[in-house]
Image: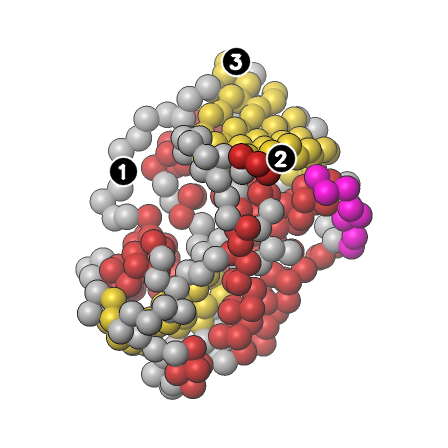
Amino acid sequence: MFGAAVLGVGTAGRVRIRDMLAPLQGSPAERLTLKGFVSRRRLESEQGVCQLSEEEVVKRDDIHVVFICTENASHQDYVRKFLQAGKHVCVEYPITLTSHAAAHLWDLAEDKGVVLHEEHIELMSADFQALQKEVQGKILLEGSLHFTGGALKASSGFMAFSGIARLTWLVQLFGQLSVAAATMEEEPVRNYSKMTATLHTVDNKVLTWTEERGPGLPRAKKIHFDFEGGSLTQIPPSAKGAAGLFMQDLVYFSSKLTGQVSPGEVHAEKSRILHCLVLAERIQHLCQGSSPGPTPHGEPSN
């Protein structure tokens, strides 16, 4: 059994607590035992679970796993803190707001002999699964993905990081990408922002990724992919799975803890995550007019 603690009790943290209290029967998630949660607020209990301090989580020998469900800007420091304490860590995306820091955290996890897992439930969604099935085997000519949503908090980080789920969609669908151009439009008075990035596939096909945020904007994705032989302009209809997305991720993370995920799959996942972080970082540099600097893991500069 793995004793676990949840750090942060916003929406994601509460779902993590709920899922661990009632894990999917017969799954590796049943190996997790929730010991408590950590919050900056004084809550006493949440869903019958007791509140702990960060220091207790670090020191207690019966807590082996920490779920980090705090604001994006805080992820890096918390991940490092609990990895250094020898805890397995599951963190909501993005793991960090720089690719270099993420690479160092994975090195630290390896040194400590623990699992570091970054949640990416967007790849488990029925929408994505249906889209991936539709795209498979087709030859891309060009495409676009436009996401809209409500205004972002400053702690969410730059839009290429807060929206990295969409970038992950594109990488998973079309393979490694490079950044050709990126621009940013902002209207601080009405808390509006729009980021547009031009991406190239390995065979130089163009993908345009747009993140648009502001008060009142609906949470929605619009796609337009042109392939040889036809176009795809809507995400195919799909039925939701029996288990919720966070539960699916909990089962997957627990499978890593119990050694049921192959080293090759873990390595491929880590490579994809670091690649997406590198892309997000380059987009940020281009939007802000700064130098991209060195690229980790020998990935070529654009």
Q: Nearer the viewer, residue 55 or 222?
A: 55
Q: Is residue 296 above or below residue 210?
A: below
Q: Nearer the viewer, residue 172 or 73?
A: 73
- On residue 214, the disc is none
Q: Which mark is in front, 2 or 1?
A: 2
- Badge 1 density bin: few <14, some 14–19, many ≥20, Cα 10 Å: few
Q: Secondary structure at mark 2?
A: strand
Lateral position of residue 176 relative to residue 90, left or right: right
Lateral position of residue 260 relative to residue 106, left or right: left
Amino acid on which the number 2 mark rests in the picture: Glu
- Badge 3 density bin: few <14, some 14–19, many ≥20, Cα 10 Å: few
* Residue 64: x %, y % from top left: 39, 77
Query: Does residue 36 show up?
Result: no
Q: Nearer the viewer, residue 99 or 173?
A: 99
Identified at 35% across, 62% down, the residue is 9
Amino acid on which the number 1 mark rests in the picture: Lys
Q: Which badge, 3 or 1, is on the more N-terminal residue?
A: 3
Q: Is residue 265 above or below residue 171?
A: below
Q: Secondary structure at mark 1?
A: loop
Amino acid on which the number 3 mark rests in the picture: Gly
Residue 270, by quadrant, is: bottom right
| Residue situated furthest front in the rendering | 189
The residue singled out by tag 1 in the image is 240
The residue singled out by tag 3 in the image is 229
- On residue 186, the disc is 2
Q: Which residues are magenta?
A: 287-294
Q: How many angstroms separate mark 2 from mark 1 (CA)?
A: 36 Å
Q: Which badge, 3 or 2, is on the more N-terminal residue?
A: 2
Type of secondary structure dominating the magenta stretch: loop
